[in-house]
C-alpha cells in the first residue's frame, strides 16, 4: 500500500480507524483491499481540502457525487493520482460504488447513527426537485433569459440529450392556430435510433417559445450562444443549474445537476 495513504488512514480517530480496517479486511483479495484503501484515501484528501471541518462520517451522498463528478471532469485538484486528468464515467462509477460500500458497511456495523444513502437520489431528480426546476425556468424567463429558460424547460419535459437540443431549429416546432393566434404546440426531434419523435410543448413554455421564435429566421438553430455559435454541453449544464438555483434548489445540490440526469 502507498505509505502516504496508510499514514492518512492511521491519522483518523480510533473509532473511524477501526471501521476502515474492518471494512478493508472484509475482503480477502489484496487487490480489492488496495483499491478500497486508495479510493477512500483519495476521497478523504478531497474532503479535507474542500471542507476541512467535516469528518469522514459526516459526509453525505452529495459529497460522494460531487467528488466523483470532479474526478470525471478533471476538476480534482487533490486526491487523485493525476490531478486535472479527466476520468472515464465507468471509472468514477466504480469509485462511487467503493465509497458507497464503505458507508453501507459503517452503518451495518453501528459506526453510523443513520442509514447512509449515496445512490439514486444523487444521480436523479426527485419529484419535488423537478417542480422547483420548472418554477426556476419560469423565473429565468421573467428575468429575460428566454433561451436558457426554454432549453432547461425542454430538457426537463423531454429528457433529450444535449446533442439533440443543440441541433433543434425553428423547423422542429409545429405551430397551430388557436383562436386566431399561432401557438407552438409540438416539438419534434430524433431519438438515439434516428427515429422522429414528437413531444407536446408544456403550456407555460409556449409563450416563451413564441417570443424566442420571433427573433429567428426559418431554419435557424433554436439555441445559440451570444456570439451565434451552437450551444454545447457546458452551456446546457449552466442553464440547468441557473434554473435550479432560481427555483430554490440549494446551491450544493444545484451545482451537481447534469443534463443526463433528466
Image (tube, rainbow, N blue to C red):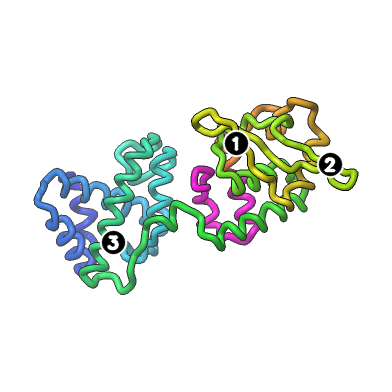
**Residue 23 image position (x, y, % from top left):** 18, 59
> Does residue 23 appear left or right of residue 143 in this picture?
left
Label 2 or label 1, whichever comes before in sequence order:
2
Q: Position of residue 170 (x, y in %)?
A: 73, 31
The front one of 7 and 27 is: 27
Q: Are marks 1 and 3 in contact (CB under 8 Å)?
A: no
- Name the element at disc 2: strand
Q: Earlier in the sequence, mark 3 or mark 2?
A: 3
* Range of residues picked out in magenta: 238-262
Q: Earlier in the sequence, mark 1 or mark 3?
A: 3
Residue 215, image quadrant: top right
Q: Is residue 247 above or below residue 259?
A: below
Residue tagged by mark 2?
177
Q: Report whether residue 227 is seen.
A: no
Image quarter hosting the N terminus:
top left
Q: Nearer the viewer, mark 1 or mark 3?
A: 1
Q: CA distance from mark 1 to mark 3?
A: 42 Å
Q: In which quadrant of the rendered view does residue 163 lie?
A: top right
Cβ atoms under marks 2 and 1 closer than 8 Å: no
> Would residue 255 be seen by someone viewing this image from the given angle?
yes
Q: Is residue 259 magenta?
A: yes
Residue receiving disc 1: 197
Q: Which residue is mark 3?
A: 103
What residue appears at the point 28 percent right and 61 percent down from the top-left corner?
A: 103
Residue 200 placed where, x, y %? 67, 45
158 and 59: which is toward the camera: 158
Amino acid at each position: 500500500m502507498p505509505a502516504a495513504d496508510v499514514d492518512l488512514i492511521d491519522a483518523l480517530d480510533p473509532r473511524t480507524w477501526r471501521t476502515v480496517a474492518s471494512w478493508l479486511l472484509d475482503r480477502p483479495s489484496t487487490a480489492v483491499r488496495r483499491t478500497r484503501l486508495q479510493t477512500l484515501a483519495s476521497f478523504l484528501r478531497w474532503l479535507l481540502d474542500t471542507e476541512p471541518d467535516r469528518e469522514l462520517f459526516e459526509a453525505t451522498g452529495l459529497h460522494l457525487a460531487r467528488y466523483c463528478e470532479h474526478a470525471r471532469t478533471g476538476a480534482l485538484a487533490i486526491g487523485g493520482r493525476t490531478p486535472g486528468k479527466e476520468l472515464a464515467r465507468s471509472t468514477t462509477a466504480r469509485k462511487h460504488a467503493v465509497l458507497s460500500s464503505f458507508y453501507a458497511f459503517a452503518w451495518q456495523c453501528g459506526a453510523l447513527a443513520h442509514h447512509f444513502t449515496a445512490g439514486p437520489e444523487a444521480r436523479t431528480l426527485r419529484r419535488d426537485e423537478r417542480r422547483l426546476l420548472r418554477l426556476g425556468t419560469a423565473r429565468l424567463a421573467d428575468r429575460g433569459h428566454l433561451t436558457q429558460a426554454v432549453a432547461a424547460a425542454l430538457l426537463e419535459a423531454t429528457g433529450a440529450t444535449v446533442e439533440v437540443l443543440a441541433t433543434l431549429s425553428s423547423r422542429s416546432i409545429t405551430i397551430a392556430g388557436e383562436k386566431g393566434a399561432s401557438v407552438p404546440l409540438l416539438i419534434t426531434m430524433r431519438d438515439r435510433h434516428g427515429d422522429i419523435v414528437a413531444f407536446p410543448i408544456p403550456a407555460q413554455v409556449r409563450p416563451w417559445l413564441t417570443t424566442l421564435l420571433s427573433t429567428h429566421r426559418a431554419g435557424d438553430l433554436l439555441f445559440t450562444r451570444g456570439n451565434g455559435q451552437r450551444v454545447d454541453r457546458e452551456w446546457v449544464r449552466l442553464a440547468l443549474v441557473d434554473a435550479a438555483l432560481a427555483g430554490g434548489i440549494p446551491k450544493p445540490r444545484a451545482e451537481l445537476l447534469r443534463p443526463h440526469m433528466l
